[in-house]
Amino acid sequence: MQKKNKKSLNRTLRQARSRAKIFGTTERPRLSVFRSNKFTYVQLIDDSKGHTLAAASTKGEKGKKSDSAKKLGAAIAEKAKKLGVKAAVFNRSFYRYHGRVKAIAEAAREAGLKI
């Protein structure tokens, strides 16, 4: 097996292992994080209906990625409050819990969202 294919397979397996344990409901939606090289995206997803309740991203923001991630966590928590959501299940996907992912989670907790 080629090295690139093995890396891709391992990444897919990590994601599936993480996702198998997480399910979002209307009362407690899934807070999903996606990181690209430039931007970070966050969604609140109700898996029972298959709907995205709210979304936010760091597109158009300047500065350090971790600082933008903190603002993103606070922004998604505010959107959740407007929807009446008090708690969420955190889905970090295959990303390790550090850097931007950790900054989003901590900022959302500080803004009042229970994760």
Image: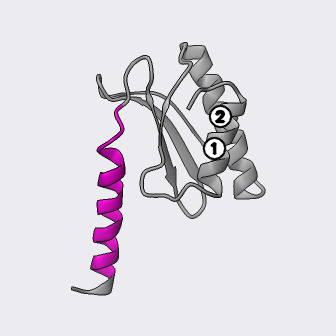
Front-most of 57 and 60? Answer: 57
Point 61% across, 18% down: residue = 81
Quadrant occupied by the C terminus: top right
**Answer yes or no: do the residues labelled 1 and 2 have beta carbons within 8 Å?**
yes
Asked whether, in this view, residue 68 is left or right of residue 53, the answer is right
Q: Residue 99, located in which quarter of the rendered image? A: bottom right
Point 71% across, 28% down: residue = 111
Quadrant occupied by the N terminus: bottom left
Three-letter code for the amino acid on which mark 2 is drawn: Ala
Question: Quick one: SS at disc 1?
Answer: helix
Residue 97, percent from left and from top: 56, 54
Residue 65, percent from left and from top: 70, 57
Q: Which residue is mark 1?
A: 104
Point 27% across, 78% down: residue = 5
Count residues near mark 1 (Cα–Cα under 10 Å), then give few for <14, some for 14-19, many for 20+.
many
Question: Quick one: SS at disc 2?
Answer: helix
Q: Residue furthest bottom?
A: 2
Secondary structure mainly formed by the magenta segment: helix
* Callout count: 2
Q: Per the image, is 53 magenta?
A: no
Q: Is residue 38 above or below residue 68?
A: below
- Distance between the Cα atoms at labels 1 and 2? 6 Å
Front-most of 10 and 4? Answer: 10
Q: Which residues are magenta?
A: 4-23
Q: Which residue is mark 2?
A: 108
Q: Residue 37, located in which quarter of the rendered image? A: bottom right
Three-letter code for the amino acid on which mark 1 is drawn: Ile
Residue 114, percent from left and from top: 59, 27
Front-most of 108 and 43? Answer: 108
